[in-house]
Image (spheres, grey):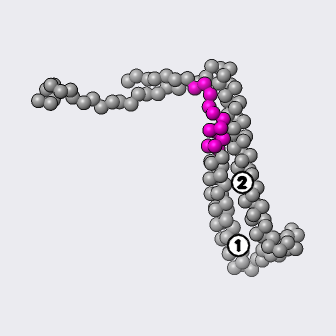
Amino acid sequence: MSIERKTLRSVSEFSIFKYLLVFYLIFFILSVIGMGVIFLFAWLFAGAAGFNFNELFGAFGLDWIPGGTAIAVVIFIILGLIGSIFYAAIGTLAMWIVNIVLKISGGIELRFMEPKAKTKPQAGTAANQ
């Protein structure tokens, strides 16, 4: 078993930014779906118990905005998308710092095992005869 050694000198910041952007966008979409389902069930159960959310929104001063709930949802989605870009930028900055440390320290040694190759019998051997 032979082990191949390679040294990691740097990682592309742009590739990390793309990876993190997709990661945070997927996480945001899943959290919006999850919170939407939770809020829908909470709305249904609270409505069945006699609780009125419109009165709650009125207590916070949102009753004067026509379609205030829809506006709040749109603002939530826009802020989530901006937050995804912000988090990806912070991750990119962290990778930039990692690259500086890699240059100072000389890199990280990575060890890879070579895959076991299946040996085929050669022509003229006892296995083929």
Q: Quadrant of residue 46?
A: bottom right
Horizontal side of residue 86 vs 113, given as left or right: right
Dominant SS in magenta: helix
- Please identify the residue farthest to the left as the structure is shown: 129
Location of residue 93 in the rendering, given as x and y in whole percent from the top left corner = 72, 36
Is disc 1 placed on a helix, strand or loop? Answer: helix
Q: Against 1, is 28 above or below?
A: below
- Which residue lies at the image location 75% right of the left edge and 58% below the top edge? 78
Q: CA distance from mark 2 to mark 1?
A: 25 Å
Horizontal side of residue 128 vs 100, given as left or right: left
Judge the density around disc 1: few (<14), some (14-19), many (≥20) Cα neighbours within 10 Å: some
- Which residue lies at the image location 67% right of the left edge and 65% below the top edge? 36
Mark 2 residue type = Leu
Q: In the image, which is nearer the foreground, mark 2 or mark 1?
A: 2
Quadrant of the snapshot with the N terminus: top left
Magenta part of the chain: 8-20
Location of residue 8 in the rendering, given as x and y in whole percent from the top left corner = 58, 26
Residue 81, numbered circle: 2
- Which residue lies at the image location 62% right of the left edge and 48% below the top edge? 22
From the viewer's side, name the closer residue of 127 and 12.
12
Q: Earlier in the sequence, mark 2 or mark 1?
A: 1
Q: Against 16, is 119 above or below?
A: above
Does residue 128 show up magenta in the picture?
Answer: no
Residue 56 visible, this angle: no
Does residue 11 show up magenta in the picture?
Answer: yes
Horizontal side of residue 78 vs 59, given as left or right: left
Residue 43, numbered circle: 1
Mark 1 residue type = Trp
Location of residue 126 in the rendering, given as x and y in whole percent from the top left corner = 13, 26
